[in-house]
Image (cartoon, rainbow, N blue to C red):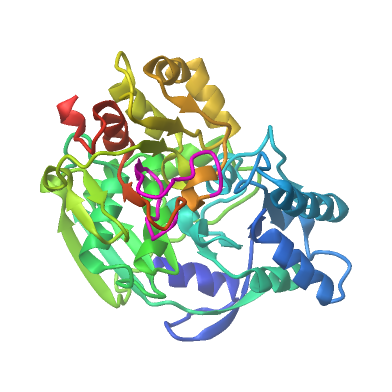
Amino acid sequence: MTLAEKILAAHADRKKVSPGEFINVRVDLILANDVTAPIAIREFRRLGVDKVFDPKKVVMVPDHFVPNKDIASAEQAKLMREFAHEQGVIYFEVGQMGIEHVLLPEQGLVLPGDVVIGADSHTCTYGALGALAAGMGSTDIAAAMTTGDIWMKVPPTIKLVYHGSLGEWVGGKDLILYTIGNIGVDGALYSAIEFAGEAIGTLSMDGRFTMANMAVEAGAKAGIFRVDNKTQLYIKSRAKRPYAVYEPDGDAEYSQIIEYDVSDIEPQVALPHSPANTRPISQVGGIEINQAVIGSCTNGRLDDLRLAARILKGRKVHPGVRCIIIPGSQRVYLDALSIGLIETFIKAGAVVSTPTCGPCLGGHMGVLAAGERCISTTNRNFVGRMGSPKSEVYLSNPAVAAASAVMGRIASPEEV
């Protein structure tokens, strides 16, 4: 069996599962946010049950429109907050919270071998820890909060193998953008992606979170990494409960095995209006921008902020650009503060926000007007994703976004 199949079999009390089978799967953690939790809560009420199956396995994180941007978002957060307190589930309020997919691994709530479902498509981020994590609809979440299990079709697994050594300024964001550009936004439709190869072994955990996060942009059900020494080191100080590490079998059957040589991959940029519309930075040209966003559940971790600070230190954001930097959690914010990154950003003329999803989904803290262009470290650049349907979003790694903020146009880090 593949890594995904091993985890699903264990959670279905089966010796073996195969792609296409429908199984009942026990879940270790259920997640919802301030956009999706209110729908799940209403559906939960309709089921007529009084209590969630296990409050220690339900997590609610307001992160999309917080601090609340208007009355409607305040009402959403209030409904979520009151339910969380009533049920005694794990809940993070403004001041303790962060962007959910940065926060949960950081808090040790997701561990290797877990099955995690969340009412957010980027729940697949937790595959970086060797967990089977998938986004689901709010109705599915309501049912899971009641029963503690889900009904799932076993996905086939695509194995992506990355050989070679990464070049300067090239990281997890570039690998996943390159991959999506290669296989397309439906290239892994309802499949589990298993990331492998020596280049993956050299990636930091933050880089792996980025790749797992964007597996869904290739249509995948989940993106998953084997647990190695880096993973164990990451969770050693965070784990508060036992966990199981699974390994794929040597004779596991994959629907596809795709191999890449990363040695010649440049920093990648996804042009409007698809994450698959990728080009190497050398072929993008000097496209003028109005805004640069560095943050999100894709690239709002400490390594990402360090990378941006390498570019911005001693330099100034272009006068025609708004540079918005959003740490992924309070811990990331505090760590960035303690090592001087926040000072670097502010001296460069950037603005630093409280942790929030904010502009990624066109929520707040950086919504675009018609005709504006933004380079962003977020995960999607669909029409109207960050504001006006007449705006444009370009996706990149933090170094490219920071270099572009300095130059006033999409630029390679090597230019600055």
Which residue is pictured at 24% across the width and 60% down the height? Answer: 277
Q: Nearer the viewer, residue 236 or 172?
A: 172
Which quadrant would the N terminus be assigned to in this image?
bottom left
Residue 225 in sight in this render:
no
Q: Nearer the viewer, residue 5 or 120?
A: 120
Which quadrant would the C terminus be assigned to in this image?
top left
In the image, residue 203 above or below residue 184: above
Q: Position of residue 296 (x, y in %)?
A: 47, 43
Which residue is pictured at 41% across the width and 63% down the height? Answer: 216
In the image, residue 200 above or below residue 169: below
Q: Position of residue 186 (x, y in %)?
A: 33, 72
Q: Position of residue 53 (x, y in %)?
A: 79, 66
Magenta segment includes 369: yes
Q: Could you tell whether 195 is left or right of 28 in the image? A: left
Q: Could you tell whether 142 is left or right of 229 in the image? A: right
In the image, residue 98 above or below residue 112: above
Residue 118 in sight in this render:
yes
Q: Could you tell whether 352 is left or right of 60 in the image? A: left
Q: Where does the magenta region start and end?
A: 363-385
Main SS of the magenta part reads loop
